[in-house]
Amino acid sequence: MSNEGWLADTRDSYDTVAASYAKLVRDLLADAPHERAALALFAELVLTAGGGSVADIGCGPGRVTAHLHRHGLDAFGIDLSPGMIEVARRDHPHLRFEVGSMTDLALADASVAGVIAWYSLIHIPDDEIGRVFAHFRRVLRPGGPLLLGFHVGDGSRLKTEGYGGHPMKVHVHRRRPEQVAAWLRAAGFAVEAETVVTSPESRLGGILFARRHPQARPVSQGRRQTGPT
């Protein structure tokens, strides 16, 4: 599938389910103590390093962005779906949300203190992961932390019906933590911790902490110099 094809399918699918999805996931963290602990640790890592803005990439309706804000972070959200961003702005009007793609982040180099992608890599094809991680590394400050959440397993499936029974057309990719860690190392990250959990977020979810290596290294993919609007 072409890059434009799967991106368009993902955007259109989540535009369709935005309202029902927001209702479904709004309170998931209340029953997910291990995920809350991971998010709290991520916030602590950012704050002890001096703080700064944090990009929640693939933020959906903004629930994790808001959760991080309550932990004292200057968090903002980016999502491919304009429908999701509309819901996020409605539910969290005090926070900043922008439409954008993790395959081509319109953020300046080394402009954020932390990056989180919370179960938002699940629709990214394997051959695009390297480009996405290169962007994550590019926009992070040297030494900045990255937190990933993803579904653990093997293979992919086509999801044709989603939240609230609405039609969707997205491939859901499950990955092994060791594969995700290998991709991160290849992109210039130091992997610091990983765990697997079962929770309302995922029947089998991977949580992985990494950090951008302090040493600078050129990244050739889609370098941008403009900050978020």
Image (tube, rainbow, N blue to C red):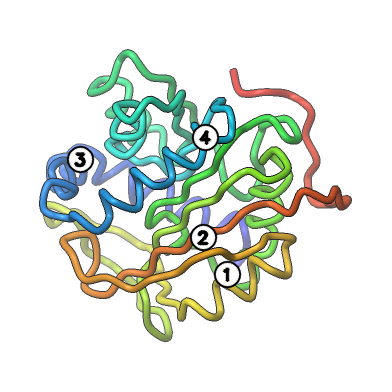
Residue at 31% across / 69% down in the picture?
A: 205
Task: Tell me which numbered mark, 1 or 4, is placed earlier along the sequence.
Answer: 1
Q: How many marks?
A: 4
Q: Are marks 1 and 2 in contact (CB under 8 Å)?
A: yes
Label 2 sits on a secondary structure element that is helix
Distance between the alpha carbons at the discs numbered 4 and 3: 31 Å
Q: Are marks 3 and 2 in contact (CB under 8 Å)?
A: no
Task: Tell me which numbered mark, 3 or 2, is placed earlier along the sequence.
Answer: 2
Mark number, residue 1 = 1
Locate the N terminus by quadrant.
bottom right
Find disc 2 in the rendering and name its residue: 6
Q: Is residue 76 left or right of residue 39?
A: right
Q: Picture quarter containing residue 188?
A: bottom right
Q: Nearer the viewer, residue 81 or 121?
A: 121
Q: Could you classify mark 3 by the number of other residues whose Cα lies within 10 Å: few (under 14), some (14-19), or many (20 or more)?
A: some
The kind of residue on which mark 4 rests is Thr
Task: Tell me which numbered mark, 3 or 1, is placed earlier along the sequence.
Answer: 1
Residue at 51% across / 33% down in the picture?
A: 54
Find disc 4 in the rendering and name its residue: 48
Expressed as whole percent of the image width and height from the top left, the position of residue 2 reads: 62, 64
Mark number, residue 22 = 3
Residue at 21% across / 71% down in the picture?
A: 198
